[in-house]
Amino acid sequence: MRVETVGIRDAPTAVVVVDPSGVVSGWCEGARLLLGWTAGETVGRPAADLLVDPPPGFPESCGTGPDPLGAITFRHSNGSKVDVVVTVQPLHGAEGRILGRAVTVQRWDRRPVIADRVFEQCPFALGVYDPELRFLWMNAVASSVIAHTEEQVLGEKYRELFPELDGLAYTNKLSEVARTGEPARLITVFRPRGSNYANAWATSMWPVRDAEGRVRAVANWGFDMSAEYWARQRLLILGEASSGIGQTLDVIGTAEELANTSVPGFVDQVTVDLFEEVLRGDEPPSSATFTLEGTVALRRVGAKADAEQRPELPPPIHYSPNSVAARCMAAGRSTVLLAAEPGPGGEWGFGPGLAADPAHWPPGNPVIDGTLGAAGLTGRIIVPLRARDALLGVVTFARGDRPEAFTADDLILAEELAAKAAVAIDNARRYTREHTTALTLQRSLLPGRLPGHEAIDAASRYLPAGAGAGVGGDWYDVIPLSGARVALVVGDVVGHGLHASASMGRLRTAVRTLADVDLPPDELLTHLDDLVLHLPGNLQPEGDSESAGESGATCLYAVYDPVSRRCTLASAGHPLPLVIAPDGTSIPVPARQGPPLGIGGLPFEATELELPEGSLLALYTDGLVERRERDVDQGITELLRTLTGPAASLEALCDTAMDVMLPTNRTDDAALLLARTRALDPEHVADCHIEPDTTQVANARKFAAERLRAWGLEEAEFVTELVVSELVTNAIKYGAPPIRLRLIRNTELICEVSDASDTSPHLRRARDVDEGGRGLMLVAQLTQAWGTRHSTNGKTIWCAQTIGLT
């Protein structure tokens, strides 16, 4: 049975006096509390009788001195055993004769014995200083950190013993704790004496007070958190690399981003060498086929050092087949070169010590190269740049200003940085090629030259986004329609890249096809929206590398009639046009933007405006008015102010608007279509009402013949009479009143017959026995074009003949 002192942290200290013959001559109260024996029970007995297994000659044979003799087991009065630590001190008389010995007995498992051993053997650095920062005590680990024993520093002031550390955060914080009595925490990074590696220490400092609360000492506790600290620093560098590399979509700019990210947090110098094919956007040599058949030529496109600037032209770099860089590229493996063998350090830490541990290095690393010292370097890491099984070049990380040699963890970080940069560089290379292809495609899909038209004068401009954004899907068009009308179209496919350009071409083609059947603007957008909704899935972009084409498209469709001077328009999520009267005042457009294309189920509304002759219509994409630093409304106001300014021509006005509205570094495409309206001379339009009676066909032919003679178009009279006869007859037989005949003289002669029926005629081949079905065939053969357009009041059948103007 063992005696427990429950609730007592400090067990009593027993002092026993033993005479020269080993007999107990004195017994204190602490001995009674510790061992249970009273003085009457122990005085006069041999001291050895109190021990379970006394050493021979106890206590004389135990020697003298202040150091404990170790664990000895005493007998308790109740028969239990008590493990204690014994210290023996001789008692001298006046003549120096030994009068006896004082034996101090303390329990092993109670303070201060156990606490002293805990602190001394603690794997963390512990130290105690007086308020003047004189050393009072420190453990073995603290002695190792400062490379001094406890005997060398006791009583010495910290600042005087280590003047090179004076003024550092650690020393200043110790003084602050001693002065204020407030505890503090601190993370310090320094290189212990005799080590080649900097360690990160998490330090806690607190005041030690006496019973009256006065600060009598300052204690500190230091934990080597180098592994966690340097891992966090590497994560910070990787995080910075993730946000800083690949922002420009430019090969040289991306290489410089890698260099800027790595210096100075990781290394002191970085060089990036790439194959010339990568700079041109071509395919680089495949890493699977790359062999060393001679000198390897690259271009140094990215470099970072204290005094090094970006050259005007990337200089060529030639690597011999036996060079480390060439061998790394051929083998596809990184190599670490150190100027000398890794020195000592990190024996109390975790992270930095790995540099000296070969078990953590991959095979073949590190390589000792004594020539690095002559170049002022402590080490190099050479990493091949590979992405998607393609070899792009090589990157070199070097240290020279810091004494720490590279560690195995540093190699991992270098490879991670190189991997991120390689993907970004390859993306930039691919973008260069795609941007050129997409721009070529987009320009081929846009109208190279706007068609001339009697209804308007038109001019346009298109500018793609800057190199960092890619080619987008903006488009515009001018489409001649029946009845001397003209359609103005502008649209935008959200996103950039080849898919956006292809989507733009697809939508432009669809608009032209729908315009050819003369649909009103709102109906045309409804059909276009349905087309986008039912696109097959294989036409959508794959992955996240491209924007989602038509699913983010907008379109504005406007139709201008020079006869009535009316403009009808509808918008599918696109900005409304600006309309400027001939006197320079703005004409409001009472229309609303409908939903973007691809939403489905929502209606589009058409709005009709009557415009004075000479009005200016401005259709544009949002890239012209939107900027990060400018509100959209402000951009529209600025565009309106620019368009109302003086200009020699529409072409000049387009140039002025693009110069004023667009910044140098734009991030979106911008398109502008300007149209100055014309009005058709009323003398060139003739119409009449037709009664729904077949006897009125002759009157219709007569009306047409008289009007053509008045216009001086007698050569077209015969064909026109036949066409009018067929169209009017069809309207009377198959249509519904009211029926109207209209003739328009423009660059061509247009004949239109309108009725209130929605039934459309169809061109067919009549059989020999059929009495009808030949009228439209005749019209199609005698005219250059014919068609049907529908309105809210019915339909119009029209045809056009080429004429010579007089």
Image (tube, rainbow, N blue to C red):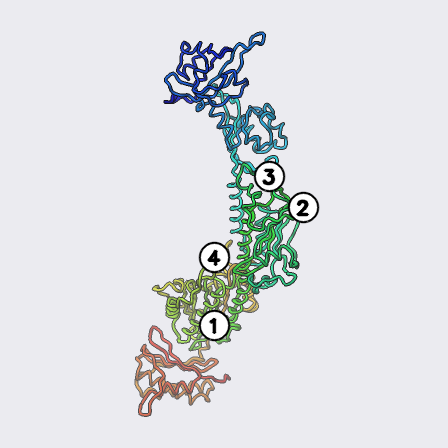
**Numbered circle sitting on residue 174:** none
Q: Earlier in the sequence, mark 4 or mark 3?
A: 3
From the viewer's perspective, is residue 775 above or below residue 613? below
The 10 Å Cα crowd at callout 1, few under 14, some 14 to 19, many 20 or more, is many
Q: Nearer the viewer, mark 4 or mark 3?
A: 3
- What residue sits right under mark 2 in the picture? 373
Q: Earlier in the sequence, mark 3 or mark 2?
A: 3
Report the side of 552 relative to 416 (left or right): left
| Separation (CA) of disc 1 from disc 3 | 78 Å
Task: Give the quarter of the image for residue 562.
Answer: bottom left
Task: Give the quarter of the image for residue 515.
Answer: bottom left
Q: Secondary structure at mark 4?
A: helix
Residue 657: x, y in percent?
Answer: 54, 63
For badge 3, the amino acid type reads: Pro
For badge 1, the amino acid type reads: Val
| Separation (CA) of disc 1 from disc 2 | 71 Å
**Numbered circle sitting on residue 478:** 1
Q: Earlier in the sequence, mark 1 or mark 3?
A: 3
| Separation (CA) of disc 4 from disc 3 | 64 Å
